[in-house]
Image (tube, rainbow, N blue to C red):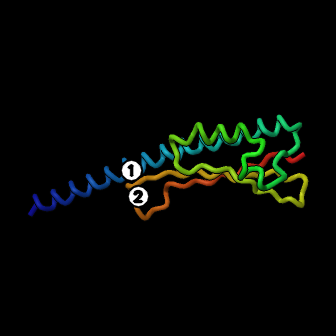
């Protein structure tokens, strides 16, 4: 009987160790995604600086078409080997001249977490509009 209790206890410890390793990997992936998002935001700052400190993205279609976004497009090329979903979208309020906001979405596949939403991150960046 004691051996049976010991076996179940050791199986529980092994399951906890496996879950801890999975969680550590998710934490690592999220850290890399945060670095990628920071890189995207810094590239948006470069775009802003190259357009005389005026938000160059007043046309919401500009981001979708990649018009004048060389640094952001390079960001997608640089990070695409690590993440299968990368996008930067404008979240501009076109009625306001001072708004220059962006949504940075990063996603990846992780088959170990079927049914759990642990592989998508969304960041919001706001730059000065004028």
Earlier sequence position, callout 2 versus callout 1: 1
Identify the residue under disc 2.
113
Which x, y percent locates residue 95?
Answer: 89, 61
SS class of the residue under badge 2?
helix
Tell me, for residue 2, which label it has, or none: none
How many residues crowd mark 1 within 10 Å: few (<14), some (14–19), many (20+)? some
Q: Residue shown at 82%/53% (left/top)?
A: 59
The 10 Å Cα crowd at callout 2, few under 14, some 14 to 19, many 20 or more, is few
Residue 64, percent from left and from top: 71, 52
Relative to the observer, which residue lies in front, 36 or 22? 36
Near-viewer residue (16 or 130): 130
Q: In which quarter of the image is the C terminus?
A: top right
Residue for point 86% across, 59% down? 94
Left or right, 18 with respect to 101, comes to left
- In the image, taking residue 118 as reference, residue 60 lies left or right, namely right
Judged from the image, the secondary structure of the residue bearing numbered disc 1 is helix
Residue at 89 percent of width and 37 percent of height = 52
Instruction: In the rendered view, tell whether residue 54 sits above or below residue 14.
Output: above
Look at the image and tell me in which quarter the N terminus lies: bottom left
Horizontal and vertical percent position of residue 73: 67, 41
- Camera-nearest residue between 127 and 60: 60
Residue 115, located in which quarter of the rendered image? bottom left
Q: Do the residues labelled 2 and 1 touch (CB within 8 Å)?
A: yes
Labels in figure, total: 2
Question: Which-is-in-front pick, marks 2 and 1?
Answer: 2
Q: Is 12 on the left or on the right of 118, as rendered? A: left
Location of residue 36 in the rendering, given as x and y in whole percent from the top left corner: 60, 41
Question: Which residue was labeled with disc 1?
Answer: 22
Tell me the CA gap for discs 2 and 1. 9 Å
Q: Which of 103 and 51 is in front in this view?
A: 51
């Amino acid at each position: 009987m004691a051996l049976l209790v010991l076996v179940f206890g050791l199986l529980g410890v092994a399951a906890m160790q496996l879950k801890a390793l999975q969680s550590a990997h998710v934490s690592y992936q999220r850290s890399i995604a945060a670095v990628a998002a920071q890189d995207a935001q810094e590239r948006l700052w470069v775009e802003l600086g190259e357009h005389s400190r005026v938000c160059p993205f007043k046309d919401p279609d500009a981001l979708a078409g990649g018009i004048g976004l060389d640094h952001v497009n390079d960001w997608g090329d640089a990070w695409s080997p690590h993440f299968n979903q990368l996008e930067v979208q404008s979240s501009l309020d076109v009625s306001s001249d001072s708004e220059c906001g962006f949504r940075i979405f990063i996603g990846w596949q992780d088959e170990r977490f079927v049914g759990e939403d642990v592989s998508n991150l969304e960041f919001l960046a706001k730059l000065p509009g004028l």
